[in-house]
Amino acid sequence: MTAPHYLIIGNGAAGLSAAEIIRQRDRNGRITIVTNEPHLFYSRPGIAYVITGQVSEKQIISRTAAFYQEHRLDLRFGTVIRLEPAQQVAHLADGSKISYDALLLAVGSSAVPAPFPGRDLEGVLTFDTLDDARRVIRYAGRAKAAVIVGGGITAMELAEGMHHQGAHTHLLQRGDRLWPRLFDERESAIIGQHARQADIHLGYNEEIEEVLGKNGKVAAVRLKSGRELKCQVVGVAIGVKPNLELVQGLPVETDQGILVNEFMQSNPPTLFAAGDVAQVRDRWTGRHNLDVLWPSAINEGRAAGYNMVDVARGATPRYIYDKGSPFNAALLFGVHLTVIGRVGGQAEKDTAELAHLSRGSSNVWTAPFTTSYRSAWDKKGANSLRIVMAGGRLVGALLLGNQELADPLRLLIEQEVNLSAVQDTLMNANGNLPKVLLEAWRDWHQSWQ
Ligand SMILES: Cc1cc2nc3c(=O)[nH]c(=O)nc-3n(C[C@H](O)[C@H](O)[C@H](O)COP(=O)(O)OP(=O)(O)OC[C@H]3O[C@@H](n4cnc5c(N)ncnc54)[C@H](O)[C@@H]3O)c2cc1C
């Protein structure tokens, strides 16, 4: 029997994690990874810290050419333009084709393009890739002023980065707070205060009507309020969309992303999807949700890789992907943020195009509750903590500043620990929420030792 051929489209978190697991399980199989980015594997969230100068490009490129060689991963730089899943063949833009025994679509998602006139002017930027980070550095580095639009983490990261590159920076929000899908007014106020201290100008209830150009380059933006802001670069971070082009017209079930079963399989069973492009059922909401999160991409990629080996050998897949609580940790204007599980927030209401997830975010965070839930908040100095409980269990938490409770909270949420006995104490902790939570955590932890 010839060794199976595994084809992975996408060299990001999901694609590479799948390749690593496949190589562990199958020493002889051929593994081909196709990528349309001209780089070895790098940390995509890391590009936010490249533009703020906190890390170098070199530090985020975490796999060497030797690594690919050692694991016999055949990395091909090119673009897959068409699939024939029934024939198990993928076609590349250079005219070549690759046949496979199992295929993983780990093609990620892309920034939603600017919806306003002037979007094609030089200096209107989105922020998906390492090459985008280089463009941000180049354009913001020689701009006097920058305008960024978007209500999520990427918009804030872009603002911080463009400011760091020397541009006088405006961050515009359509609504009346930062990251409305996630933050409540109090959390937005805390981050907003740090942004202002960092000399970022925040504009609420402001939208771009048009980007105005001169000689094909950005010269200003006209806002819906009629105000004009002179600028030489515009950052657009209004959400992301899974890259579904390759499955269009195929009998592959899609919703916002590719719908996969618990084995990360689509249709036919030799076709798998993982990462930003996949929509996976989760135990928290009972629905198929998108997580455009780095850890989710890694875990989904691993599950897919494991099952691809079985399917390529003609066996039934066995590894059930058990989606954990969505988690993100980030640094915004010098404030550490951790968000875990379902924390509520206000879903974007306006146009369908703008209602997508922002980078580093999950549908689960804002999924509506079918049962009643309770929430408590505490703030001390620069630190704040919000918890959400339902059915006597912690289901979500958002920490700003002090991160001492991040791991305990994650475990309490992940393990669905029953906290009914202390629920009322937690809800009425009046300034003592961290202390009461820590005690609940210690009690639970000790009961396991
Ligand atoms: C600025 C930024 C900040 C972020 N911050 C966070 C954060 O704080 N926390 C967090 O959890 N997540 C964050 N994320 C999200 C996280 O990076 C993604 O969820 C994760 O990278 C998804 O991995 P993936 O493998 O699914 O896709 P990707 O990493 O996007 O990889 C997909 C790859 O497929 C390639 N590809 C696509 N189509 C084709 C084709 N037709 N042919 C060949 N190759 C193709 C793409 O070029 C790309 O290289 C951030 C992302 C960005 C951009």
Image (cartoon, rainbow, N blue to C red):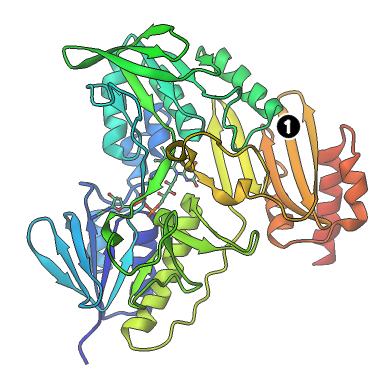
Residue in the foreground of this view, choosing between 122 and 52 = 122
Q: What residue type is disc 1 on?
A: Ser
**Where does residue 121 sit, x and y in percent of width and height?**
23, 22
Q: Which residue is mark 1?
A: 384
Q: Quadrant of residue 432?
A: top right
Camera-side residue of 347 and 418: 347
| Image position of 110 with respect to 448: above or below | above
Residue 220 percent coordinates (x, y): 32, 10
What residue do we see at 52% from left, 24% from top? 174
On the picture, is 246 further left or further right than 322?
left
Q: Quadrant of the N terminus?
A: bottom left
Quarter that holds the C terminus: bottom right
Q: Residue furthest bottom?
A: 1
Q: Position of residue 304 (x, y in %)?
A: 41, 70
Q: In the rendered view, does 384 fall on the left or right side of 125?
A: right
Q: Is residue 292 visible?
A: yes
Characterize the local packing of mark 1: few (<14), some (14-19) or many (20 or more) Cα atoms within 10 angstroms. many
Question: Cβ(mark 1) to ligand 1 < 8 Å?
Answer: no
Task: Classify 437 as above or below 124.
Answer: below
Give the residue at x 63% y 43%. Answer: 339
